Amino acid sequence: MSDKRNVTCIICPVGCRIEVELENEDILNLSGYRCKRGLQYAKDEVTSPKRILTTTVRLKARSAHVLPVRTRAPIPRSCMKDAMKELKSVFVCPPVKMGDVVLKDVAGTGVDVIASRSWTE
Ligand code: SF4
């Protein structure tokens, strides 16, 4: 028996609504996308959804105690909890530059967590 899922593409501001027809988790048909990027997004979204993780880690600075960070690329949503657990033990000492790696290979995803801003003191 087939199942239909609707996915709103978030790759660009157009926000196409893509209908995905599935049977036992196999994709039978996709419709409503306007480009290949949206097609790939919808496939990933129903098989292994991924997101950029944005959060903060502890910072040992005089003027602030947290540093905003994010994953360099999207990671599987199923790894978010483990990633947050690992990031709880990260402590960054300045100076740090935007883009510096604060944690390598978070939760075994192969994706690094990087600083979202610089901090000098
Ligand atoms: S399918 Fe293509 S055009 Fe539509 S929202 Fe996604 S990226 Fe934009």
Image (tube, helix red, strand yellow):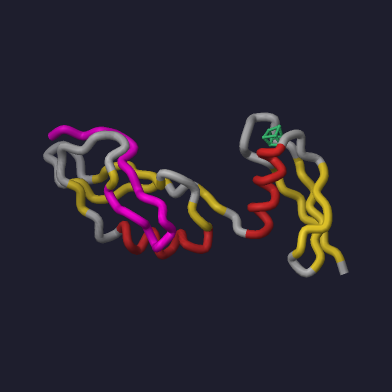
Q: Image point 49% across, 53% down: which residue?
A: 75
Rendered image quadrant of residue 2: bottom right
In the image, taking residue 111 as reference, residue 40 lies left or right, namely right
In the image, taking residue 96 as reference, residue 72 lies left or right, namely right
Q: Residue furthest right?
A: 1
59 shown above or below 87: above
Q: What main secondary structure does the magenta stretch of the protein show?
A: loop
Quick check: is 84 in the magenta stretch?
A: no
Ligand 1 picture quarter:
top right
Q: Image point 41% across, 47% down: which residue?
A: 71
Rendered image quadrant of residue 4: bottom right
Q: Image point 41% across, 52% down: which residue?
A: 111
User: Residue 32 location, x and y as percent?
Assistant: 81, 40
Q: Residue furthest top?
A: 13
Quarter of the picture holding the N terminus: bottom right
Quarter of the picture holding the C terminus: top left
Front position in the image: 19 or 43: 43
Quick check: is 108 in the magenta stretch?
A: yes
User: Residue 39 location, x and y as percent?
Assistant: 71, 43
28 shown above or below 40: below
86 shown above or below 57: below
Rendered image quadrant of residue 96: top left
Where are the magenta residues, as a range? 102-121
Q: Image point 68% across, 41% down: which residue?
A: 9
User: Residue 93 location, x and y as percent?
Assistant: 15, 45
Q: How many marks?
A: 0
User: Residue 5 location, x and y as percent?
Assistant: 77, 55
In the image, taking residue 8 as reference, residue 93 lies left or right, namely left
